Amino acid sequence: WPVDDGRRGAAPRIALAARGGEEASRYEAGDRVTAMSPVDEEWYPGTIDRANDDGTFVVKWDDPDGGPETNNLAAPNLKKVKVFKDYAVGDDVRARAAADSAWYAGRVSGVNSDGTFQVAWDDPGGGPETEDVYPESMKKRVVFLDYKPGDKVEASDPGDGHTYPAVVVSKNADGTFKVRWDDVADEDAAEADVSARDMKYPALPVSALEVGQKYLGTINSVREFGAFVDIGCEIEGLLHISRIMDGLVDDIHAHLEVGQEVDVWVSHLREEGKIALTMVESKIEGEARKEPQDLSRFVGLDPGSWYAGVVDRLLSFRA
């Protein structure tokens, strides 16, 4: 439970013994965490400001939203956020804008002393051209550079900034690509030189996916129950925590982080159009693709009798 620090909505103090030990030693000043607010018992992002003598920690909230700027919290009410922090000037990233919390493409243009990074947006859209962003609100953007002549792509027109379907014609000496726009009658405007950063393959429709297909995916976000993965489809797939590995996963952040590339299989395609993924091939829910099992040998058997059998395989299940 949160510690009673004399503020509104505070909960009862917990025993000191429950706050110390190995769990408390995991945290130190500067650690990025999600922590439980004593006001509403919801989890919010913050930073460990310092450790207290009683084994609790002062957490400084990213957005106090009218409440206290800091709270004293015990280790059980903290979760360390595993964040990639080694960004360098020039790195291509996607980052979350403070104005609307949406993710946009940009490039690291500066490294700040407070641990944030200055991100220059590819398309400011009338807003500020740069913004200081915490690393947990950033993820590396892998720019594909190996397009081939004849590849169908979606590319940003240098003239108006809008994205249109096109076909790659050739690769230029400066690393850009010459593309030919679909359905453009004017020969003078039919082709343009486009940076690889402004091109991508068209997203796969969900209807093109099949259970059992393997993809190289990129982790877009990590939650306590699993991770959302970009496999190049029109929607993200959900990688449930029980399908990360064989056996029990206690801390998902110890296994996955935003921007990490992982091999995944399509485990299940939900009727509502959602995609379930797995990192463990044996956990594919692919029975629908297989022929129905022949159960004729079991017809007429006494369900109360015992029969000899052979173990075919072992499966792991999460309680």
Image: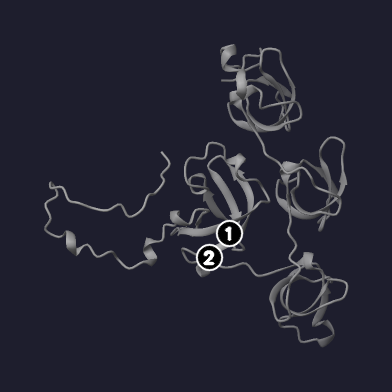
Which one is in front, 25 or 190?
25
Which quadrant of the view contains residue 7?
A: top right
Count of picture labels: 2
In-front residue for pair 268/190: 268
Classify mark 1: residues with Cα within 10 Å, few (<14), some (14-19) or many (20+). some
- Say if mark 2 contacts mark 1, CB within 8 Å: yes
Disc 1 marks a residue whose amino acid type is Ile
Give the side of residue 159 with respect to residue 143, left or right.
Answer: right
- What type is the residue that disc 2 sits on? Val
Residue 246: image x %, image y %?
48, 46
Residue 29 - label: none
The answer to whether residue 197 shows anywhere in this view is yes
Q: Residues within 10 Å of mark 2 (few under 14, many from 20)?
A: some
Towards the viewer: 37 or 22: 22
Q: Which mark is residue 235?
A: 1
Above or below, 292 relative to 225: below
Q: Please tell me which residue is depicted at 79% across the width and 45% down the height of the picture.
A: 86
Where is residue 288 drawn, in percent x and y? 37, 63
Q: Quadrant of the C terminus?
A: top left
Going from N to C along the chain, the mark reached first, 2 or 1, is: 2
Quarter occupied by the N terminus:
top right
Residue 39 appears in the figure? no
Residue holding disc 2:
206
The structure residue drawn at horizontal position 51% and vertical position 44%, both measured from the top left corner, is 241
Q: Residue visible at 61% across and 40% down?
A: 253
Secondary structure of the residue carrying numbered label 1: loop
- In the rendered view, how is the structure colored? one colour
In this view, the residue in front, 194 or 7, is 194
Question: Left or right of 153: which side holds 11?
Answer: left
x, y percentage for residue 237?
55, 55
Task: Give the residue drawn at x 76%, y 29%.
Answer: 30
